[in-house]
Image (cartoon, helix red, strand yellow):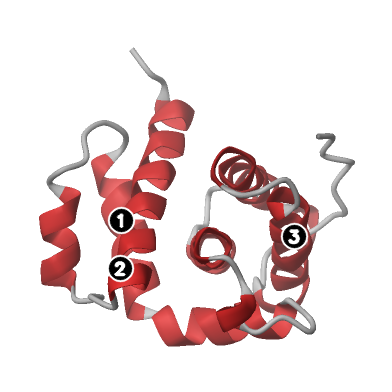
Amino acid sequence: MAGPQEARTLARERAMQVLYRADLTGERTVEAVRGWATEREGGDLAYFETLVDGVLSGWDVLGEIVSRCAQNWSLGRMAVVDRTILRIGAYELMHSRGIPARVCLDEAVELAKRYGDAQSYSFVNGVLDRVLREHANRPPEETQPRETLGA
């Protein structure tokens, strides 16, 4: 049986898939997303719902923050998978107390490695590191520089 960390990892992956679809189709209503969510199984359902609801309700604000932190990259220039992961990561960094920032960053990077292109993980890491420093309002021990991620 999967532990809490694995369940949240799967919840993030499921949320990324549903929010990716929402970005592509433009259907960002809770009703539309709830319908897609029933197609997904596994993971921490409560955390999945928190992520999806949080990202949908903050869609434009999260997009603006990501765009500002991705210097010289507008949302429209980003790959859909990258901007989806960035919105989720920004939401987590700004709103998920009790989850260390390092975990939020690592999880986003792992999603980017799995679903993005060869450069996605470093792009996601750099943008979310800036989100953390400029917008996350976390305790100092959670905002210390990270060690290298490796490939």
Neighbour class for label 1 at 10 Å: few (<14), some, many (≥20)? many
Which residue matches tag 3? Answer: 123
Q: Identify the residue at horizontal 57%, vertical 87% (top origin).
A: 64
Left/right placement of residue 2 relative to residue 72 reads left
Q: Decide: is 128 above or below 102.
A: below
The three-letter amino acid code for the residue at tag 2 is Ala
Structural distance between the alpha carbons of marks 3 and 1: 21 Å
Which of pointers 3 and 1 lies earlier in the amino acid sequence?
A: 1
- The kind of secondary structure element at disc 3 is helix
Q: Decide: is 46 above or below 31.
A: above
Say whether marks 1 and 2 touch (CB < 8 Å).
yes
Which residue matches tag 2? Answer: 22
Say whether marks 2 and 3 touch (CB < 8 Å).
no
Residue 8 percent across, percent down from the top left: 42, 38
The three-letter amino acid code for the residue at tag 1 is Val
Which of pointers 2 and 3 lies earlier in the amino acid sequence?
A: 2
Neighbour class for label 2 at 10 Å: few (<14), some, many (≥20)? some
Q: Decide: is 22 above or below 46.
A: below
Structural distance between the alpha carbons of marks 2 and 3: 22 Å
Which residue matches tag 1? Answer: 18
Neighbour class for label 3 at 10 Å: few (<14), some, many (≥20)? some
